[in-house]
Amino acid sequence: MASERALEARRKRHRPKVTRRLAAEAIGSFFLFAGIVGSGIMGEALAGGNTAVALLANSVATGAILAVLIAMLGPLSGAHFNPAVTLAFLIRREIALPEAAGFVLMQIGGGILGVWAAHFMFDMPVWQLSENARTGSGQWLGEGIATFGLLFTILGTLKVAKAWVPASVAVWLALSGPRRKTRLGELARGRAIGSGMTSTTPRSAFQRLAIILAVVVQIGATFLPQLGYGEPIGDRSDSVRTLITPAGWAFAIWGPLFFGSAFYAIWQALPAQRDNVLLAQIGWPSVLALSMQGVWAIYTQFANLTVISALIIVTSLAALLVILHRLVAFERPFSLAERTIVAITFSALAAWLTAASIVNISASIVYHGVGGSGQFPMITAMIVAVGGVIAAVAVARSRGNPWYALVFAWALFAIYMRGGQENGAIALATLVAGLLVLGAVVVALKAKANRHHWFG
């Protein structure tokens, strides 16, 4: 018994940091989903209509990539890559609840990015939504049996032959491939995540619930330090402060942004909004944008403003820019509720995350040992100027979106009031960026149609 306790204590001492474990889950999920979808696409393309051959190619490739990922990332995180596996280890008390929640978020986020990457590599629409309902007693029974078999394989092999876990799990997944024929076939044809975003059919209850849960994650994640988990984001930001880190008071804008997000989640769930065309177009991108903000908060509080946190926040920004594009292209006039709850909220979020992404990237560079303590002010000033050009182009291409411009100007002013007081180049860069953005607004809003689009 004493020797077992000593082994357990030694294992905990040498356990990788939580940031590395979370990164391992995200990276592994990314490559696993990319491999599943990519091999499915290639299998169907090369099989000449022979479904059996396509399924065999998909199953073999899935097993092979999974074996490699488990062998490579297992020592870091355990290579769960599946919320059910994480739940099993949580029940066995081999992983803490906050870390388990982080694992699940990394698995979902990494998986989604992997599917998108596969779609992009094969010149398919990145955003897609399944057109077939996956429910019924047979479907649920099959999922239950397959999940039980997976857990049985993992836990059983861990107990009797740990070195065989990668091969055992890979073989199980490959052999259970036929049960997943329909689901993987749809993934391979690129219908797994998102083309129905422009659908005018009634929005599903699942989408409405997903939006609510995304906002719960977005807002709830920020309270973890108050519960004793992680460090406040403000402390993390101060530890890697750069010349373009905004003044602290600027972050108070998260209050209105969270309020707008919560109001959006409640309003879109009302029965009267079930057939809302605008909500149908932005529903799934909003799930990604809002949930990834929560993922970013969780990761940053447990790790820091690293390159991974930058990738997470850029992912949220990408989804917000998709929403912004659809708001700009929306043909009929916004209703008062759509304008105040949707257009203003998501325009403001897109602007703030544009600035936040620039700051996060700069902070991650400092975190990884480059340019700390105000070094390279001219390069930092150039980053601000380039950010201003990007924002000005975004405003011009979004019909002079005043809400985006206003919030981005707020961020620039906060940078000016902090970094601009320390370095003249930063002050000049913020002024130039601000003038570019405001100029783009003035020019675009000269058109009556643009003013009517945003103000009614």
Image (tube, grey):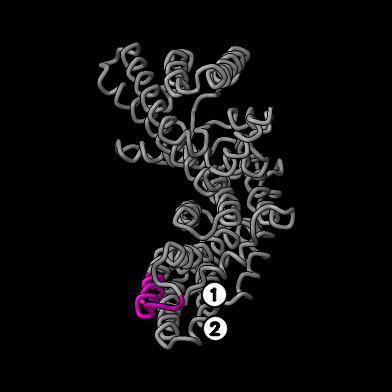
x, y percentage for residue 149? 56, 15
Percent position of residue 337, x then y: 66, 57
Of the two numbered discs 2 and 1 on the same chain, state the one appearing first in sequence: 1
- As drawn, the label of residue 417 is 2
Segment tinted magenta in the rendering: 373-389
| Quadrant in which the N terminus appears | top right
Residue 141 in the image: state x and y as whole percent.
61, 13
Q: Nearer the viewer, residue 326 or 357?
A: 357
Q: Quadrant of the C terminus?
A: bottom right
Rounded to the nearest angstrom, the CA distance separating label 2 from label 1 is 8 Å
- On the question of residue 179 being in view, the answer is yes
**Left or right, residue 50 beside residue 327:** left
In this orientation, does residue 278 appear? no
Q: Nearer the viewer, residue 327 or 111?
A: 111
Asked if the residue under mark 1 is in contact with the one under mark 2, i.e. CB atoms within 8 Å, the reply is yes
Q: Amino acid at mark 2?
A: Met
- Nearer to us in this view, 137 or 400: 137
Mark 2 residue crowding within 10 angstroms, few (<14) / some (14–19) / many (20+): some
Observer-nearest of 163 and 449: 163
Residue, x 48% and y 58% (percent of image)?
Answer: 306
Q: Is residue 435 above or below residue 321?
A: below
Q: Is residue 388 magenta?
A: yes
Residue lying at 62% horizontally and 70% vertically, measured from the top left: 251
Identify residue type, mark 1: Pro
Report the residue marked by disc 1: 246
Quadrant of the rendered image containing residue 370: bottom left
State the SS at label 2: helix
Question: What is the residue that sits farthest to the right in this orientation?
Answer: 227
Q: Position of residue 406 (x, y in %)?
A: 54, 73
Is 195 inside the magenta-drawn segment?
Answer: no
